Image: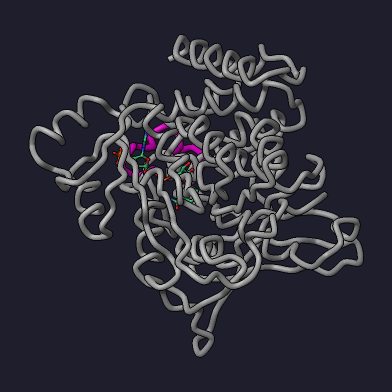
Amino acid sequence: MMCPPLPAKEAGTSARPRRVVLLGATGSIGQSTLEVIRRHPDRLQLVGAAARSNAAELGAIAREFGVADLALYDAEAASAARANGLLPPQARLRTGADGLAELARLPGADCVVVAVVGTTALHPTLAAIDAGKSIALASKEILVLAGRFVMEAARRHGVAILPVDSEHNALFQCLQGNAPEGVKRLLLTASGGAFRDLPLEQFERITVNQALRHPNWSMGPKVTIDSATMANKGLELIEARWLFGCRPDQLGVVLHPQSIVHSMVEFIDGSMLAQLSPPSMTFALQHVLLYPERAAPARPGLDWSEALRLDFRPPDPARYPCLGLAQAALAAGGSVPAAFNAANEVAVTAFLHGRIGFTAISSIIEKTIESFPGDEPGSLAEVMEADAEARRLASGLI
Ligand SMILES: NC(=O)c1ccc[n+]([C@@H]2O[C@H](COP(=O)([O-])OP(=O)(O)OC[C@H]3O[C@@H](n4cnc5c(N)ncnc54)[C@H](OP(=O)(O)O)[C@@H]3O)[C@@H](O)[C@H]2O)c1
């Protein structure tokens, strides 16, 4: 087990603000990132921002932060944005996957926050690594799809992959200063999502609106559904395997309904370290954006003048079949995690569009991944083939 590599340039006090490119600026993580940047204008400067199609919001961000370097993935939305004057006149707008990659390599930028839902930002992330930018990674799907290739590229270029996901950020903080040989297990906490207490016989009738109501976190639709199925925790186990270089049997999950303990490290001497903060992504984002410095938070921390209750229990496998499937995919290795991720994305999109029921998400993943081999893909092209094949199979099952 090891910690993510931290190049020398990440250490020490910076004399000028750290220049940040934000991919996924209009989403939930994007908005939390902007909240942190607003709180620390002397230390952080937004220099680039990208979204898929929400040009009005991207334009508002560009005006507020004085950002000229922008990207919209969707070419039609980009043309409409230009025609309707939605972006500031001085904007340099890029489009498509190449546009995102170009923004990720922006000269002068120090750090790229990757917060695009799904795996679209894989190539832009590799482009940013190639250009020597440090990566603040929220898009867990990228490591699930191509963790080996992303981590190898980061090592080769001496670039830090700093975890934004609150669980991995907690583990990263708890691992600091501890010898890897002393670590026994990484224990990821899970809120249990919208249906942690719903009677199992009601699962067949779950609606999209019910599934989108997360009890603790305000997040984008895909990750909210992933929380309800706990596919999200499964993706996070696979993400942790790559970020921390651990074996599948060194990773565990515990249900923690309050979402205050974000994860824990168990050491071989029986001690455990945990990281606690309120359930807002601003804490993890600020930690990585200012790393290794610390500063006053964007939102108030925990209030210890009031009683605080923390509960923990093991997750029920019958309630969360997607978690078991992700654990099987993690143990199998090879292209199975990529197939798990692709089938999940297809099934969640179909659920959000009312084309399948909630319980079909796990059946589609199960049927899709069973035909994938555990052999390690030899190249990124093979990984992308497995991803495309899994999407084809999963779509055929809907
Ligand atoms: N939300 C959380 O609390 C949280 C916590 C941990 C990890 N994460 C991870 O962070 C990532 C983002 O989650 P989110 O909740 O912020 O999602 P979200 O609210 O749905 O926002 C997604 C963002 O990605 C952009 N986007 C989508 N497809 C794109 C494309 N093809 N090209 C460029 N931009 C694209 C969207 O732009 P438009 O607005 O134009 O569509 C939007 O800015 C996910 O991987 C998620 O698993 C989220």
Q: Is 326 situated left or right of 348 in this image?
A: right
The verdict on residue 209 being magenta is yes
Residue 303 at x, y percent in the picture: 49, 83
* Dominant secondary structure of the residues highlighted in magenta in the image: helix
What percent of the width, then of the height, locates residue 273? 74, 68
Q: Hey, which residue is sitting farthest left in the picture?
A: 84
Residue 10 inside the magenta-drawn segment: no
In the image: residue 52, left or right of residue 304: left
Q: Is residue 325 visible?
A: yes
Residue at 40% from the left image edge and 34% from the top image edge: 100
Which residue of the protein is positioned furthest toward the bottom in this rendering?
Answer: 305
In the rendering, at what x and y percent does residue 118 appear?
46, 33
The quarter of the displayed image where residue 45 is located: bottom left
For the point 42% across and 34% down, the residue is 102
Image vertical order of residue 353 relative to residue 382, above or below: below
Asked if residue 230 shows in the view, the reply is: no
Task: Place residue 271 in its image quadrant.
Answer: bottom right
Residue at coordinates 44% horizontally, 60% vertically from top-left? 216
Please tell me in which quarter of the rendered image ligand 1 is found: top left
Q: Is 52 or 343 nearer to us in this picture?
A: 52
Q: Which residues are magenta?
A: 200-211
Where the C terminus falls, by quadrant?
top left
Instruction: In the rendered view, tell whether residue 388 sits above or below residue 282.
Output: above
